[in-house]
C-alpha cells in the first residue's frame, strides 16, 4: 500500500541520517519552546507522536494557551507545505505527519486488495458490426453498456472500463464487501438474463460470454492531467477472468475460477467443466459454469452445504434458546436477539437450535436479509414466500399463482382477499382471477404487512413456529416495520422469533418483557483448540502452528476454522504418526481467501482510521 511504502521510506531515511526522527529538541528550540523538552521526553513524545497531539494533550503536558497555539499552528503550517511539495521526501521537521500528508495526496496510490474481476463480452460482435450500419451498432452497444452499468452499480461494483463490446468490472474495490464474489455472479446472471431484451435490427437476440475470477492484486490509482483518474490492477486475477471468458465460456455461459467457486460456497448451482489449460497459465485448473441461484433457507445454509463442524463453546446460548422455545410451545411467545460480530457464531447457534427441534412438530419461517437488498422493500418476506410456495426458476406466472394459492389456503379460508396482495408483492399478474387492487400504495403496504402477520398467527395456531430473521443489520425499512408488528403480536402466540444482528444495530424492542437480548463473546483457547481438533480430524498439530492460529484468530470461531483449513491445504504441514508436523520454521502466512473480503470490508468502513490500521499492520504486534 502506498501509505505503507511511505512508512518504509521514512525508515530508510532514518537509517541514512537524513531524517532525525527523535530530535524533538531542535523543533522545540526553533519555536522558542525548548524549556518543554524534558516534559515531552518524560511523556515519550517524539516526532512520531507529535503530529498526533491535540490541544487537550498539550494542555495536559502543561503548555500555556499561547504556546499550545504556537505549536499547533507550526504543525499545521508544515503539513500544508508538505502537501504542496512536489518532492517525495518529507520535510525534516514534520517527520511522520509529512509522510501521511504525502500518502493522501500522492499521484499514484497503491494498495493490495482481494478482488473479484468480471469480464463480459458480446458473442459474435465482429460479424454483427460488419453486418450493421455503424449507428445501429452504436445504439446496440449503448444499450448493452447501460444494462451493465446499472447492474454493476446496483451491487456496488466498480465499472473499470468499457472495452468496445466488452465490460471490465471489479468487486472489492474501491469499497470491499464480504460477499464480493456473490455480487459479481449475481450481476452476471442479471445481465445474462436481461441481454435477450436487446435485439438486433433483424430481431436476433444478443448473447454473452462471461468470465469471473478472484484473488489478490495490487491496485494503482494513476492520476493524469489529461486522462483523469484510472485504476491499474496488477496480478493474475484479471488475466484469468479474461481467459475464462475468451477460451472456455460459450454463448450464454458464466464461467468461474476455482478461487471464486470456493468463496461462493453453495449459493449457486454450478457445473464442473473439468480441468482447463489456459494461455499464460503453467498448470491446468478446474473451472465451473454457473447454472443459477440455489434456493436456500439462509446464507449460512448455502455457504456450508452440510459441511459443518460440531458446535463448540455455545452450550449456554443454545440452552437459553431451548428454554425460550419451551415457553413458546406453552403459548408464551418469545423473541431472542442474538448480537455478535461477523464470524462469532450467530448462524451456527440458530442452526444448532434447528437441529434440536428436528424431532418436534413445528413450522419454520426463515427471513434472510442481505446488503444488496437493503433498499428492496420486503425482499426477505418475498424470498420466504417463494421458497414456501416451491417456486421453480422455469415456472410460468400461472403456475406460480397456482402454487401461491395452495400455500395461502393452507392457513385460512379468506385467501381470496389475501392472494391479490401477495401476488402483487411477488410481481405476479392476478387480474384474470381476482379483482384488481383499487387502493392507494400506502394502504396496500399496510394490508400486506397485516396479511403477513396474520399468516404467522394462523401458522402458530396449527403448530409452534420458529421464526428466524438473520442479519437484520442489513434490513430494509419496510421489513423492519414488519418485524415490529410481529414482535407486538408474538407474545401470545405459540412462536419463537430469533433475530441475529451485528453490534451497532439500533432497535426499540428492548423494553418488551418477552424479548431477550443475548450478546455473543469470543471463545477461549480451550474451545478454539476443540475447533482446530475437529478440522484436523483429531490429529495433533505442530505447536508453533497451533500458537499461530490461536494468536491470529482472537477467539472468533469462523476465523479459527478457516485459518486452520488454509494451513492444512497449503502443504506447509506433513502428516506423520504423531500428527501434523512442521518440517521447518513457520513462514509468514497470509489471510485465508474466505476471510479477505470480510476483513477488508471492515477496514474500509474505518474511514481515515484505516491509514492508522495499515501502519499498525506494517509494524506488527511486537
Image (cartoon, rainbow, N blue to C red):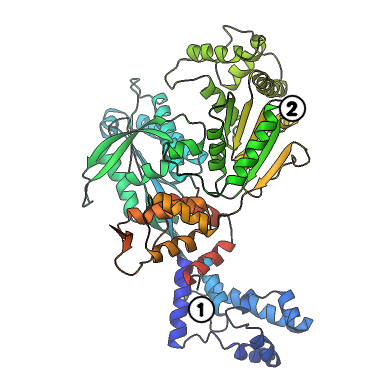
Q: Of tags 2 and 1, which is closer to the observer?
A: 2
Q: Whole-Å distance between the Cαs marked 2 and 1?
A: 64 Å
Q: Residue at x 46, y 29 (%)?
A: 295
Badge 1: how crowded within 10 Å, few (<14), some, or many (20+)?
many
Whether residue 291 is visible here, answered yes or no, is yes
Residue in view at x 72 percent, y 79 percent: 58
Query: Circles 2 and 1: CB distance less than 8 Å?
Result: no
Check disc 2: other Cα within 10 Å, few if <14, some if 14-19, many if 20+.
some
Location of mark 1 (residue): 90
Q: Quadrant of the N terminus?
A: bottom left
Residue 372 location (% of width, % of height):
54, 39
- Considering depth in this image, is 552 or 228 the residue closer to the camera? 552
Mark closer to the chain start, 2 or 1: 1
* Numbered mark located on residue 489 in the image: 2
- Which percent across, then down, holds residue 475? 62, 38
Residue at the image position 42 percent from the left and 62 percent from the top: 546
Amino acid at each position: 500500500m502506498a501509505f505503507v511504502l511511505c512508512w518504509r521510506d521514512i525508515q530508510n531515511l532514518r537509517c541514512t541520517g537524513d531524517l532525525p526522527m527523535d530530535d524533538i529538541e531542535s523543533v522545540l528550540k526553533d519555536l522558542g519552546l525548548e524549556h518543554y523538552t524534558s516534559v515531552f521526553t518524560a511523556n515519550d513524545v517524539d516526532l512520531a507522536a507529535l503530529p498526533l497531539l491535540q490541544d487537550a494533550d498539550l494542555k495536559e503536558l502543561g503548555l500555556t494557551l499561547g504556546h499550545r497555539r504556537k505549536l499547533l499552528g507550526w504543525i499545521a503550517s508544515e503539513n500544508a507545505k508538505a502537501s504542496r511539495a512536489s518532492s517525495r521526501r518529507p520535510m525534516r521537521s514534520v517527520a511522520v505527519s509529512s509522510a501521511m500528508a504525502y500518502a493522501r495526496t500522492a499521484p499514484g496510490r497503491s494498495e493490495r486488495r482481494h478482488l473479484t474481476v468480471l469480464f463480459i463480452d458480446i458473442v459474435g460482435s465482429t460479424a454483427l458490426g460488419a453486418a450493421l450500419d455503424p449507428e445501429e451498432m452504436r445504439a446496440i452497444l449503448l444499450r448493452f453498456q447501460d444494462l451493465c452499468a446499472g447492474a454493476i452499480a446496483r451491487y456496488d461494483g466498480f465499472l473499470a472500463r468499457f472495452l468496445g463490446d466488452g465490460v471490465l468490472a471489479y468487486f472489492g474495490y474501491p469499497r470491499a464487501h464480504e460477499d464480493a464474489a456473490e455480487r459479481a455472479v449475481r450481476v452476471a446472471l442479471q445481465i445474462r438474463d436481461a441481454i435477450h431484451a436487446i435485439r438486433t435490427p433483424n430481431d436476433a437476440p444478443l448473447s454473452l460470454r462471461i468470465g469471473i475470477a478472484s484473488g489478490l492484486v495490487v491496485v494503482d490509482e494513476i492520476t493524469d492531467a489529461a486522462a483523469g483518474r484510472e485504476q491499474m490492477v496488477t496480478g493474475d486475477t484479471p488475466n484469468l477472468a479474461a481467459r475464462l471468458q475468451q477460451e472456455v465460456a460459450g454463448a450464454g455461459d458464466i464461467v468461474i475460477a476455482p478461487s471464486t467457486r470456493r468463496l461462493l460456497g453453495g449459493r449457486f448451482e454450478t457445473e464442473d467443466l473439468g480441468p482447463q489449460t489456459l494461455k499464460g497459465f503453467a498448470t491446468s485448473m478446474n473451472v465451473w459454469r454457473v447454472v443459477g441461484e440455489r434456493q436456500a433457507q439462509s446464507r449460512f445454509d448455502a455457504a456450508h452445504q452440510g459441511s459443518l463442524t460440531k458446535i463448540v463453546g455455545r452450550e449456554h446460548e443454545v440452552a437459553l434458546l431451548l428454554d425460550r422455545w419451551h415457553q413458546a410451545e406453552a403459548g408464551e411467545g418469545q423473541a431472542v436477539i442474538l448480537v455478535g460480530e461477523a464470524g462469532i457464531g450467530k448462524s451456527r447457534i440458530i442452526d444448532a437450535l434447528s437441529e434440536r427441534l428436528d424431532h418436534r412438530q413445528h413450522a419454520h419461517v426463515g427471513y434472510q436479509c442481505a446488503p444488496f437488498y437493503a433498499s428492496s422493500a420486503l425482499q426477505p418476506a418475498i424470498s420466504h414466500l417463494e421458497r414456501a410456495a416451491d417456486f421453480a426458476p422455469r415456472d410460468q406466472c400461472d403456475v406460480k399463482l397456482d402454487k401461491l394459492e395452495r400455500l395461502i389456503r393452507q392457513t385460512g379460508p379468506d385467501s381470496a382477499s389475501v392472494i391479490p396482495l401477495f401476488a402483487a408483492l411477488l410481481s405476479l399478474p392476478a387480474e384474470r382471477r381476482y379483482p384488481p387492487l383499487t387502493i392507494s400504495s400506502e394502504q396496500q403496504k399496510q394490508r400486506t404487512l397485516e396479511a403477513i402477520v396474520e399468516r404467522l398467527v394462523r401458522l402458530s395456531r396449527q403448530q409452534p413456529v420458529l421464526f428466524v430473521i438473520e442479519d437484520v443489520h442489513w434490513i430494509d425499512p419496510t421489513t423492519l416495520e414488519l418485524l415490529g408488528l410481529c414482535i407486538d403480536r408474538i407474545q401470545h402466540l405459540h412462536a419463537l422469533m430469533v433475530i441475529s444482528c451485528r453490534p451497532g444495530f439500533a432497535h426499540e424492542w428492548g423494553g418488551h418483557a418477552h424479548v431477550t437480548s443475548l450478546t455473543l463473546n469470543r471463545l477461549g483457547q480451550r474451545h478454539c483448540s476443540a475447533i482446530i481438533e475437529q478440522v484436523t480430524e483429531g490429529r495433533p498439530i505442530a505447536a508453533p502452528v497451533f500458537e499461530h492460529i490461536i494468536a491470529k484468530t482472537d477467539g472468533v470461531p469462523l476465523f479459527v476454522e478457516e485459518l486452520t483449513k488454509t494451513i492444512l491445504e497449503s502443504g506447509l504441514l506433513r502428516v506423520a504418526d504423531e500428527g501434523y508436523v512442521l518440517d521447518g520454521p513457520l513462514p509468514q502466512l497470509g489471510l485465508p481467501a474466505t476471510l479477505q473480503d470480510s476483513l477488508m470490508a471492515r477496514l474500509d468502513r474505518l474511514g481515515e482510521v484505516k491509514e492508522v490500521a495499515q501502519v499498525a499492520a506494517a509494524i506488527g504486534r511486537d
